[in-house]
Image: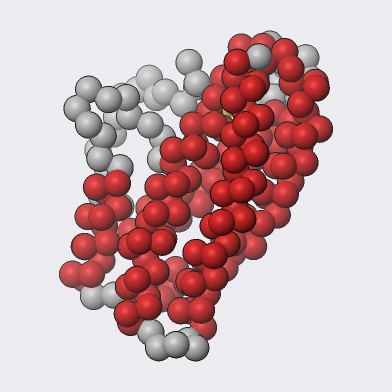
Amino acid sequence: MIFVLDNPNQPSQHGNMHLISIFDKSGPEKIAAPTPLEMLLGCHARIRHFIQLSRTLATAENVPPQEVADAAAAIFRYFSLALPLHEADEDKSLLPRIQAALPLGNLAREAAETMVEQHKAIDELAAELLSICSSLDRNPDRLPALARRLEHVTSALEQILAAHLRLEETVIFPVIQELLSPAQIEEMLAEMNERRRVPRGAIHLVQ
């Protein structure tokens, strides 16, 4: 069973780790389909969530090996599968529409182009995080040996992501509704949903 961070400010019986199951035993709820902006912001919330989980894992002590492995697997799964989908949403669905709607030199357009460039540095750090989490998933007893490296890469990733997400949330995302027509927003939503379409029989992943 995969676990994710619940409340990092509340210590648990296992030191700094406080984990809960991601599986909702109450069953699925019917909710309205999210807009592209809501999907993008939801991804931001999950990015921050898993960065915090990584930081908590790096400083955890006296945690059962299975919980270390589960936490590492959850981090690996998010940054290897869901983060690339989010970046594709921005690179392939958001940026081209902003470029088409705004002239060269426009602040929001320049910010969107910077956003895409920043993904390269983010991906390099994420690759190092994935390597560490893969090792911990296979050998959770290595946490003491890898903790400092995990904390370092998490801090670096957290720093670049803080500026990256702030740029998107304060400059880029606010213009989506203003710039795009309802038809364009529907097209963008369809593209984003298609990226997340789960083949029949496959296991659904958090995205």
**For residue 205, side relative to residue 187 (left or right):** right
Is residue 93 visible in this depiction of the protein? yes
Q: Residue at x 56, y 56 (%)?
A: 120
Looking at the picture, tell me which residue is in the foreground, 149 or 34: 149
Q: Locate residue 68 relative to residue 16 in the image: left or right.
A: left
5 or 132, nearer to the observer: 132
Q: Left or right: 85 with respect to 8?
A: left
Quarter of the rendering containing residue 3: top right
Q: Visible in this render: residue 32?
A: no
Identify the coloring.
secondary structure
Q: Viewer-proximal residue, 150 or 167?
A: 150
Q: Position of residue 39 (x, y in %)?
A: 37, 53
Number of numbered callouts drawn: 0
Q: At 61% from the left edge and 12% from the top edge, which residue is drawn? A: 66
Residue 152's place in the image compared with 68, above or below, is: below
Q: Residue at x 59, y 34 (%)?
A: 130
In the figure, 76 relative to 66: above or below? below
Location of residue 134 in the rendering, given as x and y in whole percent from the top left corner: 59, 25
Which quadrant: the C terminus?
Answer: top left
Q: Where in the figure is residue 8, as x and y percent of width and height?
A: 68, 34
Q: In the image, is residue 97 above or below residue 64? A: below
Where is residue 172 shown, x and y percent of the image? 47, 71
Residue at 33% in and 62% down: 93
> Front-most of 158 and 129?
129
Q: Is residue 71 left or right of residue 116?
A: right
Q: Quadrant of residue 148?
A: top right
Q: Is residue 87 above or below residue 1?
A: below
